[in-house]
Amino acid sequence: AINIILALSLNLINGFTGLCSLGHAGFMAVGAYTCAILSMSPDQKAANYVLQPIVPWLENMHLPFLPSLLVAGLFTGFIGWLLGVIALRLRDDYLAIATLGFSEIIRVVLTNAQAITNGSLGLKGLPRYTTMWWAWGTAIVITIFLVLLIKSSYGRAFKSIRDNEIAAEAMGIDVFGMKVLSFTISSALAGIAGGLLAHYLTTIDPK
């Protein structure tokens, strides 16, 4: 079910919008860490952050699983939007290289931001919130959302950009804006899948 969410989110940008992105693992990692840190209790954080204490503003922050998952999706979508604004002026192989580089930057940041992510030690003993119902329920909701999106005017705009950017622009479609929107939605869904995977494995690290 988690892989279905990942495949559908990647298909939105690669298949329907025609953009070659290789940075999906980075978005997944952002979602996994965000969801994990927000849903861990203060006692779990104290047990994990041994070498360096967690930053004070995250120390006592504790949210239920669903709000943590939603915040993870929104935050990852915001990161995707930032990257999209910068990188989506590139095309083809250049875009692929830029997104691959971003994914590697995320790994390096996760390894070195000791006070936030616990560095290379990772996060252990996460609550196993991801059950079959959570995983399949989320997959079904996201599948329905993407089917409705692709059948809407936004979906038709994505497909027209994939088929011919110049013709799409001539028809009045904001090509750059639609690319950024597609990238943002795809990133947010990857972040949600990452959050589900973190609470299925119950342990994550930058690798």
Image: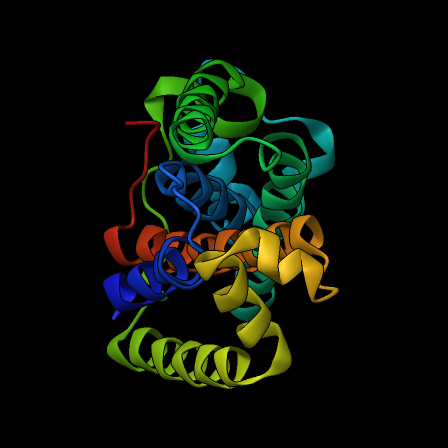
Q: How many marks?
A: 0
Is residue 157 among what the camera can see?
Answer: yes
Name which residue lies at 48% across and 48% down: 31
Name which residue lies at 61% across and 35% down: 83
- Counting from the top left corner in percent of width and height, residue 202 is at 29, 50
Toward which corner of the image does residue 124 lie, by quadrant? top left
Q: Looking at the picture, tell me which residue is in the foreground, 171 or 8.
A: 171
- Counting from the top left corner in percent of width and height, residue 164 is at 50, 57
Is residue 64 among what the camera can see?
Answer: no
Q: Is residue 28 above or below residue 52?
A: below
Toward which corner of the image does residue 23 lie, by quadrant? top left
- Counting from the top left corner in percent of width and height, residue 197 is at 31, 55
Quarter of the N terminus within the rendering:
bottom left
Does 32 sit left or right of 161 as displayed? Answer: left
Name which residue lies at 54% across and 45% down: 34
Quarter of the C terminus within the rendering:
top left
Does 176 sit left or right of 158 as displayed? Answer: right
Q: Is residue 12 above or below residue 89?
A: below
Does 47 sit left or right of 136 as displayed? Answer: right
Q: Looking at the picture, tell me which residue is in the foreground, 93 or 137.
A: 93
Q: Looking at the picture, tell me which residue is in the foreground, 139 or 178.
A: 178
Name which residue lies at 56% across and 60% down: 185
Q: Is residue 27 above or below residue 201?
A: above
- Counting from the top left corner in percent of width and height, residue 151 is at 51, 85
Protein image colouring: rainbow
